[in-house]
């Protein structure tokens, strides 16, 4: 299955998308691009017409650069032909993205780019994508101040590797630390739950065979109650220990 780059459209700054597409093509071997326009947000592009205009402008700009330089842009213009603009509703963000990622081969084949997204939008999209199992969530960042008078100097082909970064947001230290904490808590509660289930099954079996007045049944019921109380207590203690 081919790798697909999902670029989220929240801005009309075309060169931002050019840099992200160029890096992903050059370093991540993408074969398709999906520009995703999230409808119904208070920020970003106004409507379908503007989103369509930005989509067209991106590829026009790429063609212009391909004619000026005989490098990465020409390759993209000639080989990266699987391009689509996909509008989705903000109100059904998780459902729509889930279907979209499944259609394109699942989490392993999907690369998310949030370069153009504002803080609020990027948090929403990042959270949904991460919950859907996407680990390749990136942003292209310049390492030097942007000069609007010389925009071409800040394009991918003109930048050295020390002048930009393509950061994977899902593997930053804070995200990894939080993920590890959730896994530890989930494992602990899973073990407690399994023990409680075993106790319940044994208790029911003995109840049927020995009756409700059996001292052993009463002991098991007490044990199950203790385990039920212990589950949230263990989670709370683990949380306090980490902080």
Image (cartoon, rainbow, N blue to C red):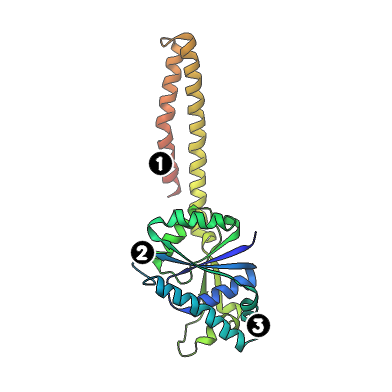
Which residue corresponds to mark 3?
71
Most foreground residue, 22 or 162? 22
> What is the x, y in percent for residue 33?
56, 68
Q: Residues within 10 Å of mark 1 (few under 14, many from 20)?
A: few
Q: What residue is rendered at 33% in x and 67% in y?
A: 42
Give the foreground label among 1 and 2: 2
Q: Does residue 155 show up?
A: no
Which residue corresponds to mark 2?
40
Q: Is residue 145 above or below residue 240?
A: below
Q: Is residue 182 above or below residue 60?
A: above
Query: Which is nearer the N-term, disc 3 or disc 1?
Result: 3
Disc on res. 142 = none
> What is the x, y in percent for residue 233?
40, 36
Q: What residue is rendered at 43% in x and 45% in y?
A: 239
Give the foreground label among 2 and 3: 2
> What is the x, y in percent for residue 152?
53, 87
* Label 2 with label 3: CB-CB less than 8 Å: no
Q: Residues within 10 Å of mark 3 (few under 14, many from 20)?
A: few
The quarter of the picture where residue 81 lies is bottom right
Disc on res. 236 = 1
Query: Which is nearer the N-term, disc 2 or disc 3?
Result: 2
Q: Quadrant of the N terminus?
A: bottom right
């Amino acid at each position: 299955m081919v790798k697909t780059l999902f670029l989220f459209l929240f801005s009309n700054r075309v060169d931002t998308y050019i840099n992200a597409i160029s890096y992903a093509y050059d370093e991540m071997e993408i074969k398709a691009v999906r520009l995703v326009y999230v409808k119904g947000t208070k920020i970003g592009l106004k409507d379908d017409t503007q989103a369509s205009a930005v989509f067209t402008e991106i590829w026009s700009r790429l063609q212009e650069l391909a004619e000026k330089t005989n490098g990465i842009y020409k390759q993209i213009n000639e080989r990266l032909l699987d391009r689509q603009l996909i509008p989705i509703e903000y109100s059904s963000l998780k459902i729509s993205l889930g279907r979209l990622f499944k259609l394109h081969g699942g989490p392993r084949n999907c690369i998310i780019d949030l370069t153009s997204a504002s803080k609020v939008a990027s948090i929403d999209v990042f959270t949904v994508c991460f919950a859907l199992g996407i680990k390749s969530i990136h942003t292209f960042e310049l390492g030097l101040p942007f000069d609007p008078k010389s925009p071409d100097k800040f394009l991918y082909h003109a930048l050295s590797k020390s002048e930009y970064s393509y950061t994977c947001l899902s593997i930053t230290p804070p995200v990894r630390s939080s993920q590890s904490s959730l896994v530890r808590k989930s494992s602990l509660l899973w073990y407690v739950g399994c023990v409680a289930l075993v106790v319940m099954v044994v208790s029911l079996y003995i109840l049927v065979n020995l009756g409700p007045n059996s001292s052993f049944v009463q002991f098991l019921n007490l044990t199950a109650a203790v385990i039920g109380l212990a589950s949230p207590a263990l989670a709370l203690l683990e949380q306090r220990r980490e902080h």
